Amino acid sequence: MSSSTGNEATRHLDLGCGAVPRNPYRRGHVFGIDISAQISAGNVTVVSANLALQPIPFPDAHFDSVSAYDFLEHVPRVLPRADGSGTRFPFIELMNEISRVLKPGGLFYALTPAYPSEEAFVDPTHVNILARRSHVYFVGPKPLARMYGFNGRFVLRRAEPVVYRDSVDPLAPFGAAQRWRRLRHRLKRKLAYLAWEFERAA
């Protein structure tokens, strides 16, 4: 999964990856996390963790990039604490963890079905529906999620409604065909997905 645009020293982490983690930034080594998978072959390693309950099992500043395809919508917003002492915010905690494991300047890329599209709601395991401006809780010098315990540091590169097929690869050229397809989807109100690209601040 390496390429000329990424060297062997670089590392990428794909969240909720199943058996085949994605490598959108063409890093030299690819890691994945899934609730049940655990494999290792060549330059690909997938470990098992439940990210609604557990931290990302890697050290600080370990990755050059992190991705989440069709995953954020499955992470609960609020859960009771195991001891009954109150509530915790798994999605906020996950965003903290993503910031923690990224190197300064590292990139986070996510694609998720978003409000108001039907795709965001039809799957009963979708418990975290994001909207066009949800990113303001996590980016900039004063992200709104600070009030809920968010301590990550992200700079916004982009947050926009997208056509999924044209956004799987964040490095692919975005040409006339893609612009026309996005316009048609927008006019038909069928821009079902939201793309986030954040940079880990220094």
Image: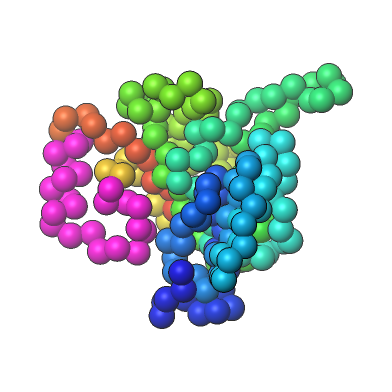
Residue 130 spot, x, y in % from top left? 46, 32
Residue 170 part of the magenta segment = yes
Left or right of 84 in this view: 11:
left
Residue 190 spot, x, y in % from top left? 23, 32
Left or right of 14 in this view: 56:
right
Q: How is the image coloured?
A: rainbow
Total count of labels: 0
User: Residue 172, relative to residue 165: is it above or below?
Assistant: below
Q: Give me the residue at 74% from left, 22% from top.
A: 80
Q: Who is closer to the viewer here, 173 or 15?
A: 15
Residue 75 shows in the view: yes
Left or right of 197 in this view: 189:
left
Left or right of 92 in this view: 159:
left
Identify the image quadrant of residue 176: bottom left
Residue 12 spot, x, y in % from top left? 55, 63
Residue 202 shows in the view: no
User: Residue 193, relative to residue 9: is it above or below?
Assistant: above
Residue 39 part of the magenta segment = no
Identify the image quadrant of residue 183: top left
- Tell me the quarter of the image containing the C terminus: bottom right
Highlighted magenta segment, given as a residue range: 165-186
Residue 20 spot, x, y in % from top left? 49, 54
Q: Give me the residue at 14% from left, 39% from top.
A: 184
Q: Give me the residue at 23% from left, 59% from top.
A: 174
Q: Give me the residue at 62% from left, 62% from top.
A: 40
Q: Who is closer to the viewer here, 141 or 78?
A: 78
